[in-house]
Amino acid sequence: MNDSWVTVARRYAQAYLDLSMGSLTLDHIERMQHLEDFLRTHTSVLFLCSMPIMKKKAQHDALAALLGKYDLAVVQPIFILLLTHKRLFLVPELLRQMRRIYYSKRSMQLFTFISSSPLTLEQNSLLQNFLARLTGSTIIYTNKVDKKLRAGVRLVSETLLWEHSISRQIRSLELPLIR
């Protein structure tokens, strides 16, 4: 998606959140992530919903059913607006922008904790507190195991990367040798 459409999606998201920020919860935001993932992998869904041959009622019902599956009726008005403006293709980016704005307004950051073996609750808590002190934000995290990461941890967000691992140390030693 080109930058101008990302900007348009961000403006729709900002306008919608200005009106309804109080009605959204962190649970809604997490479900938006699942819906976005679904729509990015099943691109034909929005295309079919926006077919001009479909009656408006059928289009609205299809969107309501989709949102009902993810328990996201709270965002139905913005979906209908995008349908009316013939911009339903913006929905995945709109959902992404809504999450980014929501996290920003709530001083939250989403991180993925990548490690070579599963982390314990205590280790997750330690990393969460470390990032909270570093960023000044509330940290929400997901875990991922990457066997290629040797004895360490990588903390990744949309804007930050912090890594302490043997893999990183090897890369830093290889770099001067390559030059």
Image (spheres, rainbow, N blue to C red):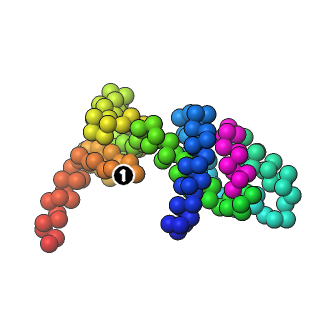
Q: Is residue 153 magenta?
A: no
The residue nearer to you, when weighing 8 against 172, is 8
Horizontal side of 59 relative to 135 (left or right) equals right
Location of residue 151 with respect to 122 vertically, above or below: below
Q: What amino acid is found at the position of numbered circle 1 in the picture?
A: Thr
Horizontal side of 22 relative to 87 (left or right) equals left
Q: Is residue 45 visible?
A: no
Task: Quarter of the image for the N terminus: give it.
Answer: bottom right
Picture coordinates of residue 99, whole percent (x, y)? 52, 45
Judging depth in this view, the residue of 158 and 38 nearest the camera is 158
Q: Farthest residue in the top direction? A: 122
Instruction: Identify whether 119 is placed above or below 4.
Output: above
Per the image, the residue denoted by label 1 is 159
Q: Residue at x 37, y 28 (%)?
A: 121
Picture residue at 44% right of the left edge, 43% below the top: 104
Rendering coords of residue 10 (x, y %): 54, 55
Along the line of sight, the residue nearer the viewer: 34 or 106: 106
Q: Position of residue 166 (x, y in %)?
A: 21, 49
Mark 1: secondary structure: loop
Magenta span has 78? Answer: yes
Nearest the eye: 7 or 162: 7
Inspect this view and state whether residue 122 appears.
yes
Tell me what residue is drawn at x 55 percent, y 40 percent: 29
Rendered-image quadrant of the C terminus = bottom left
Magenta segment boundaries in residue numbering: 69-82
Q: Main secondary structure of the magenta part?
A: helix
Q: Dividing the picture into quarters, in which one does residue 83 lie?
A: bottom right
Q: Give above or below for 134 relative to 10.
A: above
